[in-house]
């Protein structure tokens, strides 16, 4: 298989990322630096190193290709960070520490994270052109006229030099018995993946998010597939992408 596919399947990163790694001269095959993206790896004979470390595809290790993880607040979506001691990998078995994640959740956010050893799959989930839906339950510090806010967020708000849009915003239905027009619990669906997008959108409307809970990625929902905080389960590509 081509070198970029080999590196993606070995868990080094998504297809675009591994192409950059190859072109930067960080890959050696049988002791020689490789920068040719058309190179085909001989799985039986070639020794492949990235930054001096051997990488390989182990189809017989018994590990699931994809896992769903329910991230708690206070853990960083990162393999390591010099400013924060606690990352999601502190909660996962060491055999998953090489897995990549499809979209971050910031330190103060919680909910569904998808991790995989297959870089191509991660690319399909995260690339904007695929428009994979991500659904969140957002709790604000005060009640708002949710229909007005929903319309404004669907049209788009300017923040940090970007236009940020929600695909869909509805009331979450958690506190509306007495006042159906106002709530501080909203469901927000995104098809974009810009950094801290939901918090930034509400900040642009002078609203503070006090809880951000991702409940769904694609077809996989924590509301249907019960999963305790800090725990993981094996899932399939079909459950997420529907194909």
Image: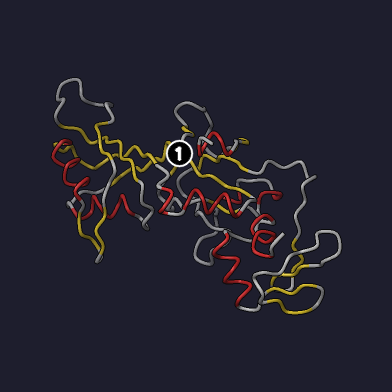
Q: Is residue 242 left or right of residue 215?
A: right
Residue drawn at 27 percent across, 34 percent down: 185
Secondary structure at badge 1 equals loop
Q: Is residue 145 above or below residue 14?
A: above
Pick whichever, 145 or 88, lies toward us. Answer: 145
Residue drawn at 25 percent across, 52 percent down: 201
Outermost residue to the right:
45
- Name the spot of residue 72 as percent of width and height, x first: 48, 43
In the picture, which quadrant includes the N terminus? bottom right
Q: Is residue 5 left or right of residue 133?
A: right
Pick whichever, 209 or 7, lies toward us. Answer: 7
- Name the spot of residue 17 as percent of width and height, x first: 56, 65
Residue drawn at 64 percent across, 70 percent down: 37
In the picture, which quadrant includes the C terminus? top right
Check disc 1 and report the residue beneath it: 218
Q: Is residue 188 above or below residue 42?
A: above
Outermost residue to the top:
177
Answer with the quarter of the image where residue 159 lies.
Answer: bottom left
Give the number of marks.
1
């Amino acid at each position: 298989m081509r070198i970029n596919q080999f590196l993606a399947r070995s868990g080094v990163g998504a297809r675009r990322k591994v192409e950059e790694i190859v072109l930067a001269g960080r890959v050696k095959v049988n002791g020689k630096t490789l920068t040719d993206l058309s190179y085909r790896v001989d799985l039986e004979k070639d020794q492949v190193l990235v930054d001096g470390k051997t990488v390989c595809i182990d189809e017989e290790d018994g590990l699931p290709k994809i896992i769903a993880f329910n991230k708690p607040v206070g853990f960083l979506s990162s393999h390591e960070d010099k400013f924060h001691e606690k990352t999601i990998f502190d909660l996962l078995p060491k055999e998953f520490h090489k897995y990549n994640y499809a979209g971050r959740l910031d330190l103060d956010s919680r909910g569904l994270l998808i991790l995989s050893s297959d870089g191509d799959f991660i690319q399909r989930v995260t690339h904007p052109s695929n428009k994979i839906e991500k659904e969140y339950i957002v709790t604000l510090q005060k009640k708002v006229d949710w229909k007005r806010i929903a319309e404004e967020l669907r049209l788009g708000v300017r923040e940090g030099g970007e236009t940020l849009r929600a695909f869909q915003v509805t009331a979450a239905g958690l506190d509306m018995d007495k006042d159906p027009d106002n709530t501080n619990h909203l469901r927000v669906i995104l098809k974009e993946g810009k950094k801290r997008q939901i918090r930034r959108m509400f900040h642009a409307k002078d609203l503070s998010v006090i809880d951000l809970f991702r409940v769904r990625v694609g077809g996989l929902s924590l509301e249907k597939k019960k999963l305790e905080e800090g725990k993981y389960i094996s899932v399939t590509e079909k459950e997420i992408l529907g194909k």
